[in-house]
Every structure is written in C-alpha cells, then in structure tokens.
Amino acid sequence: MKDKKTISREIGLEIGTLCGRHILNVEHLHYGYWTKDLKVDLSHLPAAQKNYTDFLMSNIPDGVHTILDVGCGMGHTAKRLTEAGYAVDCVSPSAFLAQQARELLQDKCKIFECFYEQLHTEKRYDLVLFSESFQYIAPETAIQKTLALLNPEGQMLICDVFKLSTKEKKSYFGRS
C-alpha cells in the first residue's frame, strides 16, 4: 500500500503533466536551460527545455552506447537519446509517467517501473543519467546503486538542482 507522501507526489506529477501539456503547451517536466539570449518567459519554456536536452546530450562522453535514464519523466529525453543512436532503458517510480513514457517510446526502451533504489537488473550501462532526478535520492544510496549498474569504464551524468548549506543568510546568488 502506498503512503500519503507517495500518493501526493504522484498526484502532483499528474497535475503538473496535465497543466504543462494543456496550459503551457510543453511535454517535458524539467525546468529548461535558459541561455543568455533567451528571455525568461513562459512563452520560451519549450525552447528552454530543448536547450536543456541539447545541453545534456552535448555532455555525454564519447564511447557511450548504453544509457539508464533515471527518473525518465514522460520519456522525451529518452526519445531524443534513442533517435541519436543510444540504447536507453528508463526508470520511473510513477505508474502514470511510466505509462506516458511507454506510449511515447513504444518498444524502443525498457521501462523499469520502480524507485531507483529498488531497481533490479543484470544489465550494466555505459552511462547512468540523472536529469533532475538525483535530488530525490539519498546521495550515498544513488552513488552506490550507480556504481553497481555501471560497466567498468561507465560514468554518471547528473544535471540537477543542488542546495548548498551556508552559514550566512545570503541567497545563493550573493544577494541578501
């Protein structure tokens, strides 16, 4: 049986997905990457989200062929990765998002419907990708799990929001 926190998170994901799709006209769940030439405005969110995926893909090391996309959302990043020739598997703890990803990806990717910490597979990957998903997993647990899932020369790519502990009462941007 699911606890209240899990149910609340799933409802939030469903609402966010539906609002994004029908109000903001976006398919991705991530925040986007706002370059200096892109004004921060909701009308530019689709472009910022494309920039984000482009940025992720530009940071995939040479020699990577297999990728595990942890927290794959609705599968749009995985779709771009498969179109670029990568073999991709996905992890999604949300039944709703896993179904969205299955519909988008068809049989191109295996989708593990579970929390990353509970993932069981014999497969090993060249890259484990955390695209705005690392923040939801205890860092020590995520790193240990990732080390177990990587090929000998495999790598971990994290693109996420991190909170730094500071003693000062200043914002992260240096302003009070």
Image (spheres, grey):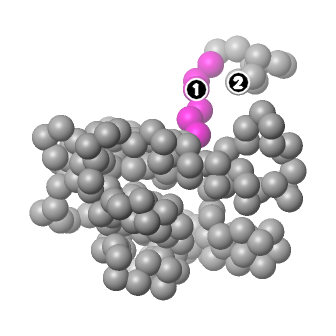
Q: Main secondary structure of the magenta part?
A: loop
Q: Secondary structure at mark 1?
A: loop
Quick one: 113 or 151, which is closer to the camera?
151
Q: Determine which residue is flagged by label 2.
A: 172
* Placement of the C terminus among the 4 image quadrants: top right
Q: Height in image: 127 above or below 71?
A: above
Residue under the point 22% across and 53% down: 125
Quarter-wise, where is residue 98 in the image? bottom left
Residue type, mark 2 in image = Tyr
Which circle's residue, 1 or 2, is located before the other in the chain? 1
Q: Secondary structure at mark 2?
A: loop
Q: Determine which residue is flagged by label 1.
A: 164
Quick one: 64 or 114, which is closer to the camera?
64
Q: Any magenta on residue 165?
A: yes
Start and end of the magenta stretch? 161-166
Marks 1 and 2 in Cβ contact (< 8 Å) = yes
Residue 69, x across and y down, in percent: 39, 58
Residue 5, x across and y down, in percent: 54, 66
Q: CA distance from mark 1 to mark 2?
A: 8 Å
